[in-house]
Amino acid sequence: MGSGLDRVAICRRRCRFARVSSLPTASDSESPPLSLGVLVSGNGSNLQAILDATGRGELNARVQLVLSNKPEVRALARARAAGVPARCISHKDYPSREAFDAALVEALREARVEWVVLAGFMRLLTPVFLDAFPWRIVNIHPALLPAFPGVHAQRQALEYGVKLTGCTVHLVDTGTDTGPILGQRAVAVRAEDDEASLSARISKEEHRLLVDVLAAIARGSLTVEPGGAAARPRVALELP
Ligand code: GRF
């Protein structure tokens, strides 16, 4: 990821369709849909938001493949109900993280996936995976990063006593929830909140934010400009 070519490559692919509105337009429907692979581990409500938005024509994308590392999760059922190819590739069947990641990459490439969405995928990815989709992996996290990375972000927010939390969509890098931020939405914490009630309100915002970010990427609004040796890349994305 070390040269200015990265910015050029991402721009060239989509910039001619750049626009500000995320509502469907004639040009959006003429442009090729974003080819998505979605990685899940559980419920799949964010996957459902993507599927619903594509169905309504609000997101110019096609989910080519849904992969779960766990069998029989609700997310796989949601994908199949929408007529989307869906499979389990269990991490338990592979001797290393790298071997598991290589199997995921192979399946996604076979499905001609260009962009990967981590929608509640509970495995850390190695460079084997990251290098296969450079700056084309998006994650949704239930907190305002860099606050409360990792698991149980809503519980962490309640325990810390913050009055404002929310959700973040970011590009994935080698760290845990550390990649360049593409969008955030705030959610107020109420005095009576418990983990379930706070999670439910954050979840609603996640669904909107994730669709808005993907729609903006589909319109060609994202640029990624690599930084220097130790610097984070600069990203710019027009959101509604
Ligand atoms: C979401 O809270 C997301 O932010 C986190 O995992 C959860 C997945 O929820 N990474 P769902 O499976 O999409 O319902």
Image: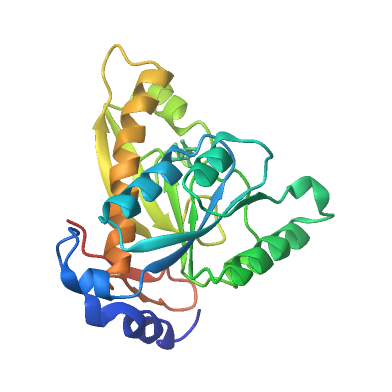
> Considering only vertical position in the picture, is 117 above or below 122?
below
Residue at the image point whose x is 35% and y is 46% from the top: 52
> Considering only vertical position in the picture, is 37 above or below 230?
above
Residue 106 position, x and y percent, is 68, 68
Front-most of 2 and 119?
119
- Whether residue 120 appears in this view of the structure is no
| Residue that protrudes farthest toward the top in the picture | 192
- Colour mode of the rendering: rainbow
Quadrant of the rendered image containing residue 191: top left
- Whether residue 38 appears in this view of the structure is yes
> Considering only vertical position in the picture, is 79 above or below 8?
above
Quadrant of the rendered image containing residue 92: top right
Front-most of 209 and 78?
78
Side of 191 relative to 155 (left or right): left
Residue at the image point whose x is 35% and y is 24% from the top: 198
Residue 32 position, x and y percent, is 35, 74
| Residue that protrudes farthest toward the right in the picture | 95
Side of 109 relative to 99 (left or right): left
Q: How many numbered marks appear?
A: 0
Residue 64 position, x and y percent, is 51, 61
Side of 92 relative to 87 (left or right): right
Residue 138 position, x and y percent, is 44, 58
Image quarter of the C terminus: bottom left
Residue at the image point whose x is 21% and y is 58% from the top: 239
